[in-house]
Structures are given as C-alpha cells and as structure tokens.
Image (spheres, rainbow, N blue to C red):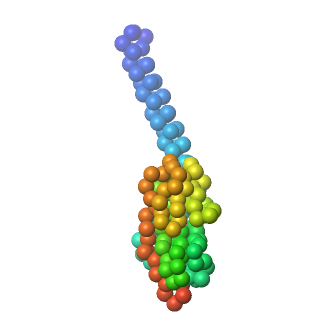
C-alpha cells in the first residue's frame, strides 16, 4: 500500500469513527429528551381545546398535574385557574410531580413554580409556557 493510499484510508476511518461517535451522541441526547417525555413528539402546548376533568379536582390555593396531557393547573383563588405546559423547557421531559407548589422535572432536576411557570432551579432557563384555561359546565378546558 502506498503512502497516499494509507493516508486516504486513515482519513476514511477517522471520518467513520467521528460519524459513529456523533450517531452515538445523538442516541444519548434523544434518550435524554424522550425517556420520560410521555406522548413523544406532541407539542408542549395544546393546539386545540383539551378537557382535563372536573374543576373541583384542583384545590383552591393548590395545583394539579395532568401529566398525560402535559399540563399543570393551579387555582390561586375560588373560580380562578391558571394553566401551564408541564413539559420542561430544558430538554422536553414532562414534569413528574408537584411538591409544595414546585413542579419537578425528573430528567435533570429543573424546578418550576406551578402557579407562575417561573423557573426556580435549572438547568432550565425559560419559564413554562402559559396555556389558556376556562371552566365549562364545571369542567376544565385548556388550550
């Protein structure tokens, strides 16, 4: 094998190794965003109205996570509701629980104030997007 053929072969092998490494990193990153992201690639905010259930399920001064719908609803005062996407703005994972008014992202530990959507702890830096919510016939409808 000549020196030029050997150099060309090394270039091809280096390129293949770099491509394999990039593919492996892509798989790792994809796992990071989909591991607990129920619903896969659906949008963070509903594109059409979604019924969540009885408004009475959200206590006054409290909140409720509708994980399957990727939404969190709080009730700051009797008859007033606020809703936010429950999809973390860092990597797209869906919040898994609410503890003392804080929504928890299970992937990287971000925390959000579920009454305002504000980031309380990173790595997320953007707040949860607000979603319109109303009560129709005693039922919460978001989007």
Quadrant assignment, res 94 = bottom right
Viewer can see residue 134? yes
How many labels, in total? 0
Question: Residue 133, relative to residue 37: is it above or below?
Answer: below
Residue 93 in picture, x, y percent from top left:
54, 56
Q: Position of residue 115 (x, y in %)?
A: 51, 68
| Residue lying farthest to the bottom in this orientation | 137
State the residue lying farthest toward the left. Answer: 4
96 displayed left or right of 11:
right
Q: Residue at x 43, y 75 (%)?
A: 132
Q: Residue at x 58, y 78 (%)?
A: 60
As drawn, 130 above or below 141: above
Which residue occupies the foreground of this view, 7 or 56? Answer: 56
- Quadrant of the image containing the C terminus: bottom left
* x and y, in percent, of residue 62 in the image: 59, 72
20 is higher (above) or lower (below) than 89: above
Give how far across and how far down residue 65 sits, in percent: 58, 69
**Which residue is more in the foreground, 94 or 3?**
94
Residue 100 placement: quadrant: bottom right
Residue positioned 51% across, 90% down in the render: 137
Write the residue at 58% across / 51% down. 109
Q: Nearer the viewer, residue 10 or 121?
A: 121
């Amino acid at each position: 094998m000549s020196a030029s053929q050997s150099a060309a072969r090394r270039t091809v092998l280096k390129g293949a190794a770099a491509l394999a490494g990039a593919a492996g990193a892509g798989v790792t990153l994809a796992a990071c965003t989909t591991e607990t992201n129920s619903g896969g690639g659906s949008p963070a905010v509903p594109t059409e109205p979604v019924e969540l259930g009885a408004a009475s399920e959200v206590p006054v001064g409290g909140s409720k996570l509708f994980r399957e719908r990727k939404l969190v609803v709080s009730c700051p005062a009797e008859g007033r509701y606020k809703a936010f996407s429950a999809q973390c703005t860092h990597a797209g994972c869906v919040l898994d629980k609410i503890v003392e008014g804080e929504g928890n992202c299970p992937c990287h530990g971000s925390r959000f104030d579920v009454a305002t959507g504000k980031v309380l702890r990173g790595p997320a830096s953007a707040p949860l997007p607000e979603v319109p919510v109303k009560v129709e016939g005693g039922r919460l409808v978001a989007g």
